[in-house]
Image (tube, rainbow, N blue to C red):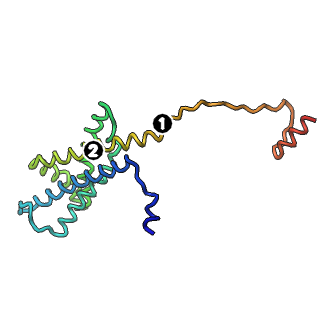
Amino acid sequence: MLSSLFSNFSPTAGEKRLYAAALAVSLAGGVVSFTIVSQMGHDQAMLRRLSGADYWFVIAGVLGSLCALFAGRDWLGHGGALGVLKLVAGILAITFMGTIIGGTLALPFYGTMFGPMMFCFTVAAHPVLALIWVNALVVAHLLMTDWRRERDSIFAPLNRSVTVVTARQPQAGARQNWLNPKRDREKRRA
């Protein structure tokens, strides 16, 4: 039964790269949110016992990064100099949206404000996390170029010669039988 359900699901090469980009960004979001969670409170140890709320904060970071990637997907995957400018704007937009969404999921009212603030403080304290996050978004950009090229090829114009066929206009004053045009033609010939 499952084989028949998933038999039509065969992603293209570009879609596989899109899924890989989503996986890279979600893992980077999880690493950053895990570091934020482990640095909260008085205990500054990376390896400590996590509570259920800590697990939820990490999941919220993963979901926030995925939602932000989905919302900012139009910024990524473009080529050329304009594509690099869109990438920089996309990194800033996706980062900001991801911190707001993840923070809101973690703590509905306070997290909306404290999510971006905690991200900035943690990245400032650990620049390696900023490198991981930016590299994940650059990798997502590179992976999404193939997906975007694949999607754009669907809408490429076809090079076909266009033949215009015109119908013969009826004579002026002649009535036409629109219910039975064959009979109308026979009447006109007679």
Please indicate whether residue 165 sits to the left or right of residue 102 in the image. right
Residue flagged by tag 1: what amino acid is it? Answer: Ala
Q: Which residue is located at x 12 percent, y 47 percent?
A: 128
Q: Between 26 and 111, which is closer to the camera in this rendering?
A: 26
Please name the residue that numbered disc 1 is placed on: 156
User: Which residue is painted at 33% across and 48% down in the image?
Assistant: 17
Quarter of the picture holding the C terminus = top right
CA neighbours of label 2 inside 10 A, class few (<14), some (14 to 19), many (20+): some
Image spot of residue 56 (x, y percent): 22, 65
Q: Which of 151 and 90 is in front in this view?
A: 151
Of the residues tagged 2 and 1, which is closer to the observer?
1
In front of the other: 106 or 45: 45
Measuring from the top left, give residue 39's x and y in whole percent: 10, 58
**Residue at 30% of width from left, 37% of height from top?**
86
Left-right relation of 154 to 143: right
Q: In this view, does 131 lie above or below 40?
A: above
Q: Which mark is residue 93?
A: 2
Q: Position of residue 152 (x, y in %)?
A: 43, 39
User: Could you tell me which secondary element the residue under label 1 belongs to?
Assistant: loop
Residue 25 image point, x, y percent: 25, 51
